[in-house]
Image: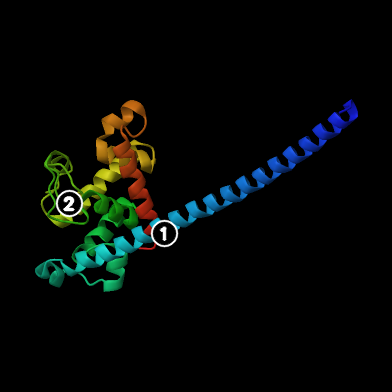
Amino acid sequence: MDASTSWQNLAEMELVFARSRRRAAARHSRSARRAALDRRFVRAVVLAIVLLGFATEGSRVVENAPAKLTASAPKLSRSVAAACGVPAAYASAFRTAARETKLPLSLLAAVAWEESRMNPHARSEAGARGMLQLMPGTAKALAIASADPRANILAGARYLEELVSRFDGNVELALSAYNAGPTAVEKIGRAPSLETLRYAENVEARAALLAAC
C-alpha cells in the first residue's frame, strides 16, 4: 500500500469517525431534551399533587372542625375554606391576624399548615402549642394566651411580624427564625440546618399556591 492510499484511508476513517461523533452528539442532545421534558413533567405532577392534597386536607379539617366553634364562627364558603386550607371556624381569626400584622393571609395559613396541619390542639414534645406552635414563653412575651386557638393565631402572626422586621423584610430568614430561633439564624445569616431550609421553602411554596386566598 503506497503512501497516498494510506492517507486516503485515514481521511475516510476520520470522516467516518466525524459522522459517528455527530450522530452521538445528536442522540445525546435528543436524550437531554427528553430528560429536561421529563423533569418538567415530574415537577408539574408533584406540584399538582401538593395542591390537590392541600385542598383535600383543608376540606377534611373543615369537616372535622368542632361543631360548637363552627356554629359561632363567621361564615365562610366551604369552597373558599377548603381551597385555602383554613378551618371555617378560624377563618375570621386568620383574616384579623393578617389585617393587624399586614402579613399575607396565605403566608399565615402556610405557616399554620407546616407547623400543625391546622390542628388547633396540636402540642409538640417541646411544649409548643396550637396551630402556630408557639412556645408558652413566646406567647407570654406577646401578652397572649397561646392555649386559645384564635389568640394563638394572632400571637403567631405577631411573632412572625416581629421576625420579618428583625430580618429587614427577608421572609425566608424570618421563616427560618420562626422554625429554628432568631439567634441561630442571625449567627450564620441563613437557615442553620437543611431541615430549617426545607421548612422555609415549603412554607413559601405553599403560600405562593394560596396567594389567591
Res. 96 image quadrant: bottom left
**Residue 152 disc label:** 2
Residue in the picture at 61% in, 45% down = 28
The local crowd at label 1, few if under 14, some if 14 to 19, many if 20 or more residues have their Cα within 10 Å, is: few
Q: Kindly state the secondary structure of the residue where label 1 is placed.
A: helix
User: Which dot marks residue 45?
Assistant: 1
Quarter assignment of residue 92:
bottom left
Please say if the residues under marks 2 and 1 sit with CB atoms less than 8 Å apart.
no
Q: Amino acid at mark 1?
A: Val
* Residue at screen point 24% across, 52% down: 112
Q: Position of residue 62 (x, y in %)?
A: 20, 67
Kindly tell me whether residue 49 is visible in this rendering: yes
Q: Is residue 89 above or below residue 177?
A: below
Label 2 environment density (alpha carbons within 10 Å; few <14, some 14–19, many ≥20): many
Q: Which residue is nearer to you in this view: 76 or 143? A: 76
In percent of width and height, residue 80 lies at 31, 69
Q: Left or right: 114 with respect to 209?
A: left
Secondary structure under the numbered disc 2 in the rendered image: helix
Taking the view exactly as shown, the residue that stands out farthest to the front is 1
Horizontal side of 45 relative to 137 (left or right) equals right
In which quadrant of the rendered image does the N terminus lie? Answer: top right
Q: Position of residue 197 (x, y in %)?
A: 34, 39
Residue 111: image location, x then y, percent = 28, 50
Residue placed at 74% from the left, 43% from the top? 19
Instruction: Give the label, 2 or 1, closer to the camera.
Output: 1
Does residue 77 appear in this view?
A: no
Quadrant housing residue 212: bottom left
The quadrant of the rendering that contains the C terminus is bottom left
**Separation of residues labelled 2 and 1 (CA atoms):** 35 Å
Task: Give the colouring mode of the picture.
Answer: rainbow
